Image (spheres, rainbow, N blue to C red):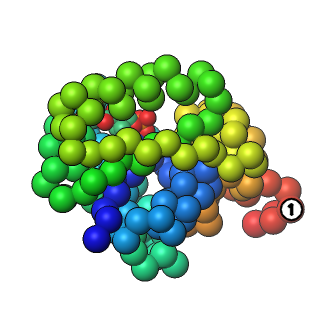
């Protein structure tokens, strides 16, 4: 039984994240999407909202579980009995920090392997923070978010997030 943890802030989950979840779920028996509680970050969505949005967006994938965690990722990984930590890589700019995290996590918990997955080309430029910024200034973000997330974003930023195509 191969179990992978896919950790992140997911504030909110984007189609880029979801693509990684779907692909990881084809490789591992179980994928645990692990939403990090980070006391240093001020998220737009509460932990409950982020978990709920991921659950809705990934409800079509049977071998995915969504959890939150605080503290070290490796401790959560160990407790879950997972062998792998999945991270998505977009551009070269992601690599340095991801490589650093992977090496530190390996030192802390050698039993787990970090597995990098290249982003889908459609989402190579995408980030949660960019989507939030565009939405906050009235831009359309409907191409980048799963429907359940888009609905939540509309509640925060208004109907402009849907774009003109679906004038609601
Ligand atoms: O989506 P993000 O913000 O890039 O995710 C970063 C995350 C949550 C994976 C990372 O900050 C993390 O693992 N946090 C938990 C605390 C921890 O283990 N820190 C040491 C990492 S080397």
Q: Residue 118 appears at what percent x and percent y?
A: 61, 44
Local SS, label 1 = loop
Q: Is residue 143 above or below residue 121?
A: below
Q: Residue 147 appears at what percent x and percent y?
A: 62, 66
Q: Is residue 3 above or below residue 71?
A: below
Q: Quadrant of residue 163?
A: bottom right
Residue 154 in sight from this viewpoint: no
Q: Residue 138 appears at what percent x and percent y?
A: 72, 40
At horizontal 18% and vertical 31% (from top left) the residue drawn is: 108
Using the image as rendered, state which of residue 134 and residue 127 is in the foreground.
Answer: 127
At horizontal 75% and vertical 48% (from top left) the residue drawn is: 122
- Left/right placement of residue 61 relative to residue 6 reads right
- Left/right placement of residue 165 relative to residue 149 reads right
**Extreme right residue here?**
165
At horizontal 41% and vertical 65% (from top left) the residue drawn is: 28
Q: Residue 84 appears at what percent x and percent y?
A: 33, 51
State the quadrant of the C terminus.
bottom right
Using the image as rendered, state which of residue 74 and residue 69 is in the foreground.
Answer: 74
Q: Quadrant of residue 132?
A: top right
Q: Which residue is mark 1?
A: 165
Report the number of discs.
1
- Left/right placement of residue 167 relative to residue 62 reads right
Q: Is residue 22 above or below residue 6?
A: below
The crowd level at tag 1 (other Cα within 10 Å; few <14, some 14-19, many 20+) is few
State the quadrant of the N terminus.
bottom left
At horizontal 37% and vertical 71% (from top left) the residue drawn is: 29
Q: Is residue 134 above or below residue 14?
A: above
Q: Quadrant of ligand 1?
A: top left
């Amino acid at each position: 039984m191969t179990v992978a943890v896919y950790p992140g802030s997911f504030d909110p989950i984007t189609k880029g994240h979801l693509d990684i979840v779907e692909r990881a779920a084809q490789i591992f028996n179980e994928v645990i999407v692990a939403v990090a509680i980070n006391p240093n970050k001020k998220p737009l969505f509460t932990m409950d909202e982020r978990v709920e949005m991921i659950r809705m967006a990934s409800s079509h994938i049977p071998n995915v579980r969504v959890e939150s965690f605080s503290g070290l990722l490796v401790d959560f990984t160990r407790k879950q009995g997972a062998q792998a930590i999945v991270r998505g890589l977009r551009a070269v700019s992601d690599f340095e920090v991801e490589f650093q995290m992977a090496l530190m996590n390996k030192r802390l918990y050698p039993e787990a392997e970090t597995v990098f997955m290249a982003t889908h080309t459609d989402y190579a430029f995408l980030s949660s923070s960019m989507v939030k910024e565009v939405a906050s200034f009235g831009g359309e973000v409907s191409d980048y978010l799963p429907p359940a997330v888009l609905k939540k974003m509309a509640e925060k930023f208004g109907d402009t997030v849907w774009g003109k195509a679906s004038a609601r």
